[in-house]
Amino acid sequence: MADFKFSCSHCKQSLEAEDDMRGQMIFCPTCNGQMQVPSLAPATPTAPHPLSMHAGTPQQPGTEMIFCPKCGVRNRENNFKCIRCGFVLHAPTQPQYVVSDDSTMGGLIPYKNAQALWAYYLGVFSLIPCVGIPLGIAALILGIRGLKYGNLHPEARGKGHAWTGIILGGLCAVGYTLLIAIPMMMAAFD
């Protein structure tokens, strides 16, 4: 098939397309503006070139064709978007985010999540009977806040410490409260 040359109606970039694309809606590979391929051929013959991200370069022999998974139109393999519907044929790669640990103990002790760390220690110390109820309640509250902070800031870590504070603090607060309340209730009924 014969190819022809035309300009983008938005950015005036010189583009080329095959004759069978005349009248179709396309997206300019330079400015992503939507336009219709002209139906009348220009007077000057041009070298063959597909609509692609490399406008103005000659077509290499044996260029592969792919089909748009959305609308089924045939596109050059190196097109970024479908020439008809604009579907992204080759999604750009997403940058990799690397969370670096700036200390050797950062994975073991969550220095950046103080609430989770406090919940852990208060949960452990709530095992002591005379201070179990207030420390257990504090461990439970700080553990929940430490979990929320850990979810918002994954680099801070400390979810294990927060869960330890929640479980130990909650069990000790409830257990010691029942340990005090049950004998008092039994004495009241006697």
Image (cartoon, helix red, strand yellow):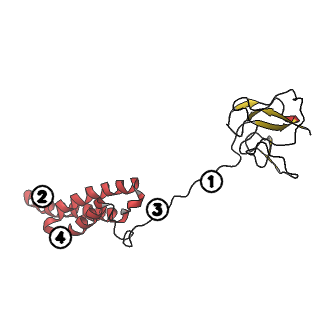
The secondary element bearing badge 3 is classed as loop
Q: Nearer the viewer, mark 4 or mark 2?
A: 4
Residue hosting label 3: 99
Task: For marks 3 and 1, give the CA distance.
Answer: 19 Å
Task: For marks 3 and 2, give the CA distance.
Answer: 54 Å
Which class describes the residues within 10 Å of circle 3: few (<14), some (14-19), or many (20+)? few
Marking on residue 128: 4
Q: Nearer the viewer, mark 2 or mark 1?
A: 1
Marking on residue 36: none
Q: Nearer the viewer, residue 93 or 181?
A: 93
The secondary element bearing badge 2 is classed as helix
The secondary element bearing badge 1 is classed as loop
The amino acid marked with disc number 1 is Thr
Asked if the residues shown at circle 3 and circle 4 are in contact, with their CB atoms under 8 angstroms apart, the answer is no
Task: For marks 2 and 1, give the CA distance.
Answer: 66 Å
Marked residue nearer the N-terminal end (3 or 1): 1
Residue hosting label 2: 185
Measured as percent of width and height from the top left, residue 157 is found at: 38, 62
Measured as percent of width and height from the top left, residue 70 is found at: 73, 41
Task: For marks 4 and 1, give the CA distance.
Answer: 54 Å
Asked if the residues shown at circle 4 and circle 2 are in contact, with their CB atoms under 8 angstroms apart, the answer is no
Measured as percent of width and height from the top left, residue 146 is found at: 32, 57
Give the image quarter of residue 88: top right
Task: For marks 4 and 2, give the CA distance.
Answer: 23 Å
Q: Nearer the viewer, residue 81 or 123?
A: 81
Measured as percent of width and height from the top left, residue 186 is found at: 11, 60
